[in-house]
Amino acid sequence: MSGLQDHFAGGITTLCRAWALTRADGLVRGFTDHDRALSFEGIDFRPETGMSASALVQGAGLAADTAEALGAISDDGITEAEIAQGRLDGATLRIWRVNWAEPAQRALEFRGLLGEIRRDGTVFRAELRGLSDLLNRPLGRVYQPRCDASLGDTRCGFDARQPGFAETRPLAQAEGTRLRFDWPDGPQAGWFAQGRVEVVDGPGAGLSAPIREDRCEGDARLIELWQPICADLAPGATLRLVAGCDKRGETCQLKFDNFLNFRGFPHLPGTDWLMAVPRSGGA
């Protein structure tokens, strides 16, 4: 505890909490409920964010540790755009109990992940999930005709960033879930359906969204998304389109030439075959 136990034994304590939030893109941000800034482990912990936390429930068993963090949405702390864009999804969190008069005296109380984030006006509430929550995730495979790998992951083994399967294009127009590109010589319609679009530059850099529909209208390419990208996509912004995979064996073989890595069971009998009963005549 780096001397914190001796501080407890002194009777008069100068304690506060400090949070270190690490987003999936590697950005680290620090917050504290003390009225002055703190600094340790190379992180500056800012006091003006209004962060607080409920009682942390921890146990010695395998039950997941739980708590809730409360804070104000502001330009200096957690922003509304950051929540809407999903940049906090999967973020890791560490919470220390710190002697603010001597930050070297501290103890790590919690290490885990951000769960569900709810907004209530200018305030957000974030569920905190301990590392033991990872043990609650289902494991194993489902036997089904379609592939259960994601295009480009280690189980798929296909390089989805190679030319022809990932195309970088300037945006012509964005309106809600609809993106338009001036692309008269692009690949056949539907090539990017069930793929994804990634923002390469601008304020939305690093964001992505799944593609619902891909069609051609004259010299224009229209991409319909399942959900809008929560960023200002101005004409001229650079986006990357990644080809889609519908998880069928035929697509894996003919479109990607990757059938040796197909992770489904295309010859699995269907429901009609399983329900068949013997008959005196016919097949």
Image: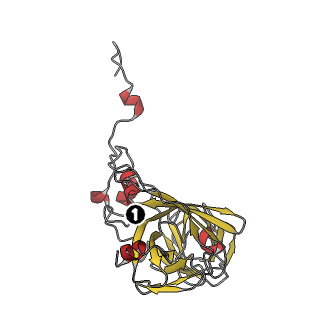
Q: Could you say which is closer to the camera, residue 49 or residue 134? A: 49
Label 1: element kind: loop
The residue positioned 49% from the left and 82% from the top of the image is 100
Q: In the rendered image, which quarter is residue 51 located in? A: bottom right
Left/right of residue 136 with respect to residue 242 in the rendered view: left
Colour mapping: secondary structure
Query: Which residue is most to the right?
Result: 121
Amino acid type of the residue that numbered disc 1 sits on in the rendered structure: Leu
Left/right of residue 39 with respect to residue 185 in the rendered view: left
Say above or below: 39 vs 4. Answer: below
Q: In the rendered image, which quarter is residue 144 located in? A: top left
Graded by Cα atoms within 10 Å as few (under 14), some (14 to 19) or many (20 or more), the crowding at tag 1 reads many
Question: How far across and down, in percent of the image, does residue 114 sit?
Answer: 50, 64
Q: In the rendered image, which quarter is residue 211 located in? A: bottom right
The residue positioned 71% from the left and 69% from the top of the image is 122
Say above or below: 182 vs 281. Answer: below
Q: Is residue 162 visible?
A: no
Q: For the C terminus, which image quadrant?
A: top left
Reading the image, the residue beneath label 1 is 151
Query: Which residue is most to the front?
Result: 11
Q: Could you say which is closer to the camera, residue 25 or residue 250? A: 25
Question: How far across and down, in percent of the image, does residue 272 sit?
Answer: 41, 29
Question: How far across and down, in percent of the image, does residue 32 sit?
Answer: 54, 77
Question: How far across and down, in percent of the image, does residue 182 sit?
Answer: 63, 78
- In this figure, what is the number of numbered marks? 1
